[in-house]
Image: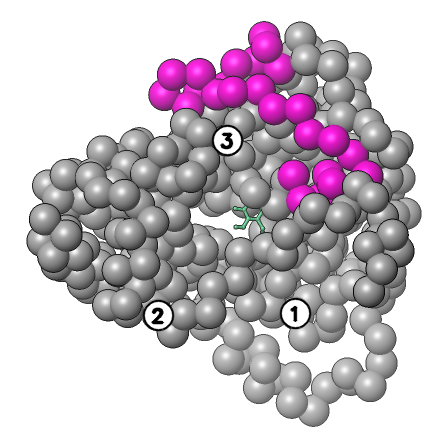
């Protein structure tokens, strides 16, 4: 292959994280309580359904269900193949070649990926002490739009609502608030989408809803903005099976509530257990924990993987030296993790 065939701005883009290790995955913040029980029912119901036909072009039934769920209108929503697709759609519609997107640092790794593949550039503003947002510095920083996630990944803390409001109100430019972990906190920006002409909120069924494998996410904005952004979305990108499962999950949220309770209950004991092993544990508002390892994090993660559990290493990143990210599991999963971690630390002493 000739390198010159490739768009010059993408020649250095690596493949994304794709571990080929046969281990139990506590590395990607999926729901460790198991699959949402609505899946089994919907798949049975769909056994003799109409999949020879296409779904609606813009997932109208799911957008209608979302409107009911949030007491908004269907045209406030865009639905698609994971909230990652929603970010892609926003950048496709908003970014001219070479324009800048302002994000906090550190942040979700795929944010920079979507900016780059849509020909933009990232400008990063370091989080302050305690991984807090610096809204004044964000507002001082030139860029076409702002993108941030709260609760923040990988730092796990939710940003102060007033800091985000300061950014939304700070300048005449779009602000995307990625609420992938929004069900784990009380506050949300979804209720404010009709108050601002520049606010976009993205959400997913991959975390608290326990549906990462079906790949469904959505964006919420004022109707005018949402309908404009939706023009850049690949028509029919959300398949019918996933759409029906997502609708059923919105109508029965018992599993989501159970998940949130499980995470709230187990996060504290997992943090305590990690602290007792010598980790420095950062406060979490999400279904995962960021912690600084007492030994080099790359060795910790690879030795733990050999014992059958995968967690995510962020230790090579500035401000996250020797940090690992761990998904909160059930009491049994967390106890097994702590015991394997104790073995790894003991063997490396
Ligand atoms: C902050 C953040 N945004 C978006 C996503 C992707 O969500 P989805 O599975 O809906 O594409 C993730 C997944 O880990 C995430 O952490």
Q: Is residue 91 left or right of residue 203?
A: right
Query: Where is residue 114 shown, x and y percent of the image?
Result: 71, 44
Select label 1 or label 2 by which is in front.
Answer: 2
Q: Is residue 125 magenta?
A: yes
The residue segment tinted magenta is 112-138
Query: Where is residue 283 shown, x and y percent of the image?
Result: 31, 32
Residue at horizontal 35 percent and vertical 55 percent from the top:
311
Residue linked to disc 2:
23
Label 1, residues with CA under 10 Å away: few <14, some 14-19, many ≥20: many
Q: CA distance from mark 1 to mark 2?
A: 26 Å
Q: Is residue 132 left or right of residue 290?
A: right
Select label 3 or label 1 by which is in front.
Answer: 3
Q: Nearer the viewer, residue 33 or 74?
A: 33
**Quarter holding residue 27:** bottom left
Residue linked to disc 1:
242
Residue linked to disc 3:
106
Q: Which circle's residue, 1 or 2, is located before the other in the chain?
A: 2
Query: Where is residue 155 shown, x and y percent of the image?
Result: 41, 34
Q: Is residue 55 magenta?
A: no
Classify the position of the N terminus by image quarter. Answer: bottom right
Q: Which circle's residue, 3 or 1, is located before the other in the chain?
A: 3
Q: Is residue 286 visible?
A: no
Q: Is residue 287 left or right of residue 124?
A: left
Q: Nearer the viewer, residue 119 or 289?
A: 119
Q: Secondary structure at mark 3?
A: loop
């Amino acid at each position: 292959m000739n390198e010159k065939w490739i768009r010059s701005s993408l020649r250095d883009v690596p493949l994304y994280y794709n571990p080929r290790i046969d281990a139990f995955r506590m590395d990607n913040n999926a729901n460790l309580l198991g699959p949402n029980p609505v899946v089994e029912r919907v798949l049975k119901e769909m056994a003799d359904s109409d999949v020879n036909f296409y779904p609606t072009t813009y997932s109208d039934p799911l957008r209608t269900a979302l409107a009911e769920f949030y007491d908004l209108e269907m045209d406030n929503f865009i639905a698609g193949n994971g909230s990652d697709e929603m970010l892609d759609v926003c950048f496709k519609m908003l970014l001219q070649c070479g324009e800048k997107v302002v994000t906090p640092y550190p942040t979700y790794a795929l944010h920079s990926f979507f900016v780059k593949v849509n020909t933009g550039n990232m400008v990063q503003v370091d989080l302050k002490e305690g991984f807090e947002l610096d809204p004044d510095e964000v507002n001082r920083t030139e860029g076409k739009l702002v993108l941030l996630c709260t609760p923040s990944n990988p730092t796990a803390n939710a940003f102060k609502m007033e800091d985000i409001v300061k950014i939304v109100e700070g300048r005449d430019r779009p602000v995307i608030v990625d609420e992938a972990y929004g069900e784990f906190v009380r506050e949300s920006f979804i209720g404010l989408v009709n108050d601002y002409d520049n606010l976009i909120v993205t959400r997913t069924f991959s975390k608290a809803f326990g549906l990462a494998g079906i790949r469904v996410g959505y964006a919420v904005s004022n109707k005018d903005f949402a309908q404009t952004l939706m023009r850049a979305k690949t028509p029919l990108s959300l398949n019918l099976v996933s759409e029906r499962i997502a609708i059923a999950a919105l109508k029965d949220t018992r599993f989501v509530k159970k998940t949130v309770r499980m995470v709230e209950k187990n996060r504290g004991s997992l943090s305590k257990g990690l602290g007792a092993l010598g980790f420095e544990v950062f406060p979490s508002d999400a279904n995962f924990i960021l912690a600084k390892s007492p030994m080099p994090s790359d060795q910790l993660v690879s030795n733990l993987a050999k014992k059958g559990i995968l967690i995510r290493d962020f230790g090579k990143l500035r401000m996250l030296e020797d940090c690992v990210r761990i998904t909160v599991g059930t009491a049994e999963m967390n106890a097994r993790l702590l015991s394997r971690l104790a073995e790894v630390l003991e063997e490396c002493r």
